[in-house]
Image (spheres, grey):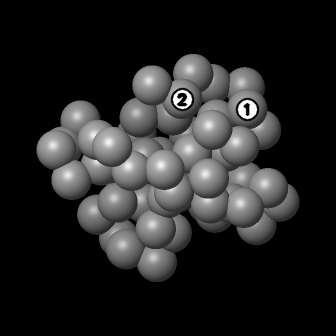
Amino acid sequence: MSTEIRGKTHIDIYDRATREEWAQRFGVSEERLRKAVTMVGSRITSVAAYLDKPAS
């Protein structure tokens, strides 16, 4: 994980590199990640719970 993402609490869904990295980290498509953020917001722990994936 890049040092830029470490320590963050929210996913910047509008930043392509961040979106790609979180999609890869969660093992989902960018589209699935976007839908998760739309449903529960951008907080990493909320997105992880929604996707049923570990947040760290």
Image position of 29 (left or right of 52): left
Q: Which mark is residue 49?
A: 1
Q: Earlier in the sequence, mark 1 or mark 2?
A: 1
Q: How many marks?
A: 2
Q: Which mark is residue 28?
A: none
| Residue identifier under label 2 | 55
Quadrant housing residue 19: bottom left
Q: Position of residue 25 (x, y in %)?
A: 41, 34
Quadrant housing residue 20: bottom left
Q: Quadrant of the C terminus?
A: top left
Q: Position of residue 4 (x, y in %)?
A: 21, 53
Residue neighbourhood size for the residue with mark 1, other residues' Cα within 10 Å, grouped as few (<14), some (14–19), many (≥20): few
Q: CA distance from mark 1 to mark 2?
A: 8 Å
- Give the answer, above or below, for where 42 lies relative to 9: below
Amino acid on which the number 2 mark rests in the picture: Ala
User: Image point 46% across, 68% down: which residue?
Assistant: 12
Image position of 40 (left or right of 26): right
User: Image point 29% across, 49% down: which residue?
Assistant: 5
User: Image point 34% across, 60% down: which residue?
Assistant: 18
Amino acid on which the number 1 mark rests in the picture: Ala
Res 1 seen here? yes
- Give the answer, above or below, for where 55 lies relative to 16: above
Find numbered disc 1 in the image and state the secondary structure of the residue it sits on: helix
Quadrant housing residue 40: bottom right
Find numbered disc 2 in the image and state the secondary structure of the residue it sits on: loop
Image position of 50 (left or right of 14): right
Residue neighbourhood size for the residue with mark 2, other residues' Cα within 10 Å, grouped as few (<14), some (14–19), many (≥20): few
Q: Quadrant of the N terminus?
A: top left
- Give the answer, above or below, for where 44 lies relative to 38: above
Q: Position of residue 9 (x, y in %)?
A: 48, 50
Callouts 1 and 2 close, C-beta under 8 Å: yes
